[in-house]
Amino acid sequence: MKRGSTMIQGNDGQPMLRVEDVHISFGVLKALNGVSLEIPQGGILAIIGPNGAGKTTLINVINGVYHPSQGHIFFEGQDVTARPPQHIAALGIARTFQNVALFKGMTVLDNIMVGRNLIMRSNFLSQGIYWGLAQKEEIRHREIVERVIDWLEIEHIRKTPAGMLPYGLQKRVELGRALAADPRLLLLDEPMAGMNLEEKEDIVRFILDANEELGTTIALVEHDMGVVMDISDRLVVLEFGEKIAEGPPEEIRNNAKVIKAYLGTARQK
Amino acid sequence: MTFAIEVAIGGLLVGIMYSLVALGFALIYKSSGIFNFAQGDMTLFSALALVGALTFLPLWLAILAVLVTMIGLAIAIEVLVLRPLVARPPLTLFMATIGLGFLLEGIGQAIWGTDPKGLDIGISDIPFKVRGLMISQLDLLGAVLSGGLFLGLVWFFQKSRTGRALRAVSDDHEAALSVGIPLGKAWVITWAISGVVALVAGVMWGTRLGVQFSLSLIALKALPVLILGGIDSIPGAIIAGLVVGASENLAEVFLGPYVGGGIQTFFPYLLALLVLWFKPYGMFGREIIERV
């Protein structure tokens, strides 16, 4: 599973996403206090930190769920600060949620088809007028979705309502829904939380495949240090809403500040 | 026996009209979690608008004009009511729909006056005989219309991309946004569809009872139907409407005489109560199972 540093920089060396001095508070709590970071093109970036460090908040800010009170976010050089989530999604940023936000009453197939929603161009009206065209488009996208299903090895549950699946499979379906949109940047919020070893290994394989075969840039929040050190090219460490370290895994592993803030407390457990 | 079948069929045909009203409720509840108290007033408003439009337009143009009006209404509701109240508790939105109901009633009265009006769409309400059974022509038209509407809606929600997006919105707003579904557009579409359903209900009820302000109270008839069928289920609304229509008619005719009659008005509620005992989410409602 161990990977060398195969970070593929874009031609112009421009990062895919740049977070610049972002601040956000909830009441008196400063959830993010001047955080800046870059997500390089084509790599896997891990965002780590103790509970309450602001990792999920950061994902929510990038994804447009929260809008920063100060600071900017640039996606491929374009200022996307304070855009609503559906616009962010349209730009090619997909995400998963910490507590799995699937459409529980819909089948796995429908869930992943909805993920494909943005790419399907025919709109409400033309669906009525050029019914045949919309139908053809539906079939084409259905093929792609079936490939995603195939790839994630969830064929046997395609017609099962998502809400009835065990947690590990729900996480996998959610990953499928995000990937169906052909995102250029994929934000994963604790993709392995609550999984057993076998499920974790599967998800790691899918994440690496998405990164290597599909060329999707990935930013993930994860607590499993072993996995994080193994798969990511670069790590960003947050504590109390501030970035305390950034660098490749070997460097972070030996960073005194990080050990004190994060790994240190983990070892005491 | 023939008489019993006649009673049942009569009830079923009335039940279709209940289904139509319940359908409007279910559509909105399904996609936005709002119990739309203004559904009855939307029905009244569309019927009034149709009567108004018929004074200077031929029937098909008048229907088209009202269709456009109902779609315009849906857009106005999204911009003026839903958008400012986004992410508020469901009760706030429920209160807003009560206000919306009064507003629609007021606007209707201001434009078209308060007198009861007849609505004539050129189909007689005189029953005809089929194999010795008396069937009303108007009810039959209602049945065909609602059947078509129902099949169309089921196809739309289950198979089309927009329908799938609407189901996604009703399931999880945040997740829907994250995959790029615009909530505002989804709401406009749902309210427009329920406006169209209101129009069909308005036409059917209006031709039968005349267009008057008590028409907005047919919403009350839809309540037991909704409870019975499950508030978020489209097939539930249809089937429960039929069950309520047939059973209340049968109960009135066959049980009524023993208890002094007049049980038609409360029988549906009794039935709904019974169903709630055994199926708290209704016959077809989505059961909410949570891990603890």
Image: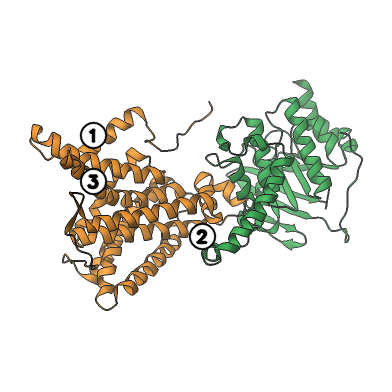
Check contact, mark 1 vs mark 3: CB within 8 A. Answer: no
| Chain that bears disc 3 | B
Q: Amino acid at mark 2?
A: Lys
Badge 2 and badge 1 in a common chain: yes
Colour representing chain A: green
Q: Is residue B80 left or right of residue A165?
A: left
Foreground residue among B157 and B25: B157
How crowded pointer 1 is (Cα within 10 Å; few <14, some 14-19, many 20+) is rated as few
The outermost residue toward the bottom is B56
Say which of marks 3 and 2 sits in front. 3
The circle on residue B189 is none
Q: Quick check: can you spot residue B266? A: no
Pointer 3: what residue? B9
Q: Residues within 10 Å of mark 2 (few under 14, many from 20)?
A: few
Q: Is residue B16 above or below residue B280?
A: below
Quarter assignment of residue B116? bottom left
In the image, taking residue B163 as reference, residue A238 lies left or right, namely right
Instruction: In the rendered structure, find residue B185 and report the number of the disc placed on it.
Output: 2
The residue closer to the viewer here, A69 or B69, is B69
Q: Earlier in the sequence, mark 3 or mark 2?
A: 3
Q: Nearer the viewer, mark 2 or mark 1?
A: 1
Quadrant where the image shows the N terminus of chain A: top right
Q: Nearer the viewer, residue A76 or A205?
A: A205
**Is the residue B279 above or below the residue A5 in the image?**
above
Chain identifier for the orange-coloured part of the image: B
Residue B228 figure quarter: top left
Dot 1 amino acid type: Leu
Question: Which x, y percent locates residue A94?
Answer: 68, 50
**Total marks in image:** 3
Query: Is A161 left or right of A95, judged from the image as shown?
Result: left
The residue positioned 62% from the left and 47% from the top of the image is: A25
Q: Which mark is residue B270?
A: 1
